[in-house]
Amino acid sequence: MSPPPTNSALSIPPSSSAELRTILASLDPTNTGYATYPSFLTVCALKLNARTTTPKAVSEAIDAAFRLFTNGDDEGPITMSHLRRVARELKEDVSEEVLKDMILEANGGGSVARGVRRDEFEGVMKRAGVF
């Protein structure tokens, strides 16, 4: 199985082939074929810090992240089944109780059945410092 294209990682693609070579050299300076976790975090932090933060760019990034949770449904909301799918895809063992708590935290304690609307998702992302 081949790795995903670089433009899908973090939705922040390298701006040029030269930048990609620089990133790869930073990740694996000794050319072992492996990246260490600290070097990976450094590259991620640099790319995240350098991204465009105009209101339009932030809104588009939040929309894209929301669609990842809702499996492409722009209308939402994010439901328990969406969170279960994401946890399964990430190979994370997350209890039903934790998933319920995530929804209730995001929607202000509304209800688990109501899920998380896009505006509530945006609030969570901003409070977490993602955007």
Image (tube, helix red, strand yellow):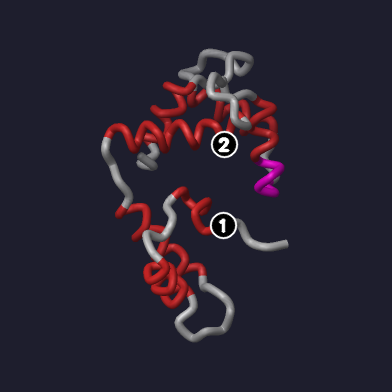
In the image, 46 versus 19, the foreground residue is: 19
Q: Within the image, what quadrant is residue 34 found in?
A: bottom right
Indicate the amino acid at tag 1.
Pro
Quadrant into which the N terminus falls: bottom right
Residue 17 percent across, percent down from the top left: 42, 68
Q: Secondary structure at mark 1?
A: loop
Q: Residue at x 69, y 34 (%)?
A: 84
Tell which residue pokes out farthest to the front in this image.
17
Q: Residue 127 sits in which quadrant?
A: top left
Q: Earlier in the sequence, mark 1 or mark 2?
A: 1
> In the displayed structure, would residue 94 be above or below residue 51?
above
Q: Nearer the viewer, residue 55 or 109?
A: 55
Q: Residues within 10 Å of mark 2 (few under 14, many from 20)?
A: some
Give the residue type that dot 2 points to.
Leu
Query: Residue at (51%, 68%) from the top-left corner?
Result: 37
Which part of the image, by quadrant, shows the C terminus? top left
Q: Secondary structure at mark 2?
A: helix
Residue 12 on image: x %, y %:
42, 52
Pinpoint residue 102: horizontal percent, then vertical percent.
55, 30
Q: Residues within 10 Å of mark 1 (few under 14, many from 20)?
A: few
Seen at 32% across and 50% down, the residue is 51
Asked whether 49 falls inside the magenta stretch, the response is no
| Residue contact at pointers 1 and 2, CB within 8 angstroms | no
Residue at 34% x, 60% y: name it.
46
Q: Nearer the viewer, residue 66 or 37?
A: 66
Which residue is label 1 attached to? 5
Q: Give the residue number, with chain letter if any, for mark 2.
A: 68
| 82, 5: nearer the viewer | 5
Q: Is residue 98 left or right of residue 17?
A: right
Say if 1 sits above or below 105 in the image: below
Magenta segment, which residues?
A: 87-92
